[in-house]
Image (spheres, helix red, strand yellow):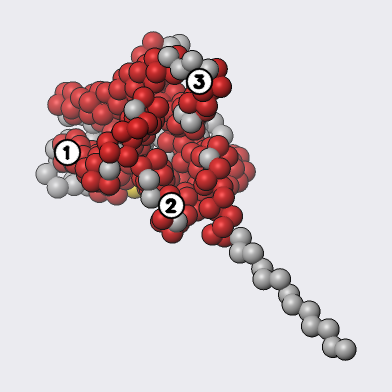
């Protein structure tokens, strides 16, 4: 037990947790998680490679998809390795600095993903409601400004979080409830006054993911209004079909988070592994499933992947000698 900086903390490290109650089978649980990590890396790197190499995909929809792949990679690289280290080596200790750094990047990429999904909703709204003005509204400079705004907003709210944590004293316990460091989990362990941390943390959630979710819903209300005004049923189905991949991304990202928040505040007391599993679904499932969904539902991506990675062998020439 040591002091860290001027916080006079009793503990010098945090202990992350695997899946409570299933410690005996951690090595077996690591198999599906390792598979998910591999799929995440291959899927998102493939999408990034294809979009970067194919100039025909340098359009708003696929540029936003590339941003989503970057945020998925970042989120997975700061969650999966810590979990696998627990499952394989039973190594649970993280220093305060390592834990605060991991927390910062997890929440940063989480906010990136939320904002990018909102930008993709705006892209779908413009494509369906204003198709003739699509290229004039979502220009390259507009995409750059949207990307910059996402980065600035995220850093503006996330940078203060680890700074505010440095002032806290941790003496109640050092055992975190998840396999990685999360802001609400860390402040629960403090024996200092965490009122400022809690208020600011709530402000961050509401002003980023909460606001993004409401704006996404508003975007789809406008999209639905436009779709219902289309005369032919075929035209309506075609317009809605362009949104399916994005709707899947919204459901995958926001549903576990909303369910977990409701259970924590209003639900019955459940075993701890239920909460851990739902948190894992929020942080781990979207990076795995997003590339699968977009490749399955987007013909252009599938065709370009085949073009880039499956080279057609030249036909052998046969010469007949007479």
What residue sits 73% from the left and 75% below the top? Answer: 316
To which residue does mark 1 refer?
156
To which residue does mark 3 refer?
236
Q: Position of residue 242 (x, y in %)?
A: 48, 31
Question: Is 227 displayed left or right of 188 in the figure?
Answer: right
Badge 2 density bin: few <14, some 14–19, many ≥20, Cα 10 Å: few
Residue 148 appearing in the image: yes
Q: Residue extending furthest front?
A: 322
Q: Which mark's residue is nearer the viewer, 1 or 2?
A: 2
Residue toward you, 55 or 42: 55
To which residue does mark 2 refer?
56
Quadrant (top left/top right/bottom left/bottom right) for the N terminus: top left
Instruction: Give whichever of discs 3 and 2 has the lower sequence position.
Output: 2
The answer to whether residue 227 is above or below residue 56 is above
The answer to whether residue 306 is above or below residue 6 is below
Q: Quadrant of residue 117?
A: top left
Are dots 3 and 2 in contact, CB under 8 Å?
A: no
Question: Is 18 displayed left or right of 171 in the figure?
Answer: right
Q: Name the secondary structure under disc 2.
A: helix
Q: Where is residue 13 in the image (x, y as percent from the top left)?
A: 30, 45
* Distance of label 3 from label 2 (alpha carbons): 26 Å
Residue toward you, 168 or 149: 149
Q: Position of residue 147 (x, y in %)?
A: 26, 43
Q: Residue extending furthest left?
A: 6
Instruction: Give whichever of discs 1 and 2 has the lower sequence position.
Output: 2
Residue toward you, 101 or 137: 137
């Amino acid at each position: 037990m040591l002091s860290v900086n001027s916080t006079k903390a009793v503990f010098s490290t945090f202990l992350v947790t695997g899946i409570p109650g299933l410690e005996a089978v951690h090595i077996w649980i690591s198999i599906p998680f390792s598979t998910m990590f591999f799929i995440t890396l291959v899927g998102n790197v493939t999408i990034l490679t294809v979009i970067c190499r194919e100039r025909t995909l340098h359009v708003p929809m696929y540029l936003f998809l590339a941003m989503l792949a970057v945020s998925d990679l970042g989120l997975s690289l700061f969650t999966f390795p810590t979990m696998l280290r627990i499952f394989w080596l039973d190594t649970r200790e993280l220093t305060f600095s390592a834990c605060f750094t991991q927390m910062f990047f997890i929440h940063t990429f989480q906010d990136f993903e939320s904002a990018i999904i909102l930008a993709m909703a705006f892209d779908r709204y413009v494509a369906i409601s204003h198709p003739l003005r699509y290229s004039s509204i979502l220009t390259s400079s507009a995409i750059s400004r949207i990307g910059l705004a996402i980065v600035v907003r995220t850093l503006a709210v996330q940078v203060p979080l680890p700074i505010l944590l440095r002032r806290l004293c941790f003496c109640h316990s050092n055992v975190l409830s998840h396999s990685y460091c999360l802001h609400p989990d860390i402040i629960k362990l403090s024996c200092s006054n965490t009122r400022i941390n809690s208020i600011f943390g709530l402000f961050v959630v509401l002003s980023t993911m909460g606001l993004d979710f409401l704006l996404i819903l508003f975007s789809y209300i406008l999209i639905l209004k436009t779709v219902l005004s289309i005369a032919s049923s075929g035209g309506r189905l075609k317009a809605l079909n362009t949104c399916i991949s994005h709707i899947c991304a919204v459901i995958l990202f926001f549903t576990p988070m909303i369910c977990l928040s409701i259970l924590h505040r209003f639900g019955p007391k459940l075993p701890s592994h239920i909460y851990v599993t739902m948190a894992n679904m929020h942080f781990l499932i979207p990076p795995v499933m997003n590339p699968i969904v977009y490749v399955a539902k987007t013909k252009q991506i599938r065709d370009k992947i085949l073009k880039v990675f499956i080279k057609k062998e030249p036909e052998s020439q046969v010469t007949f000698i007479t």
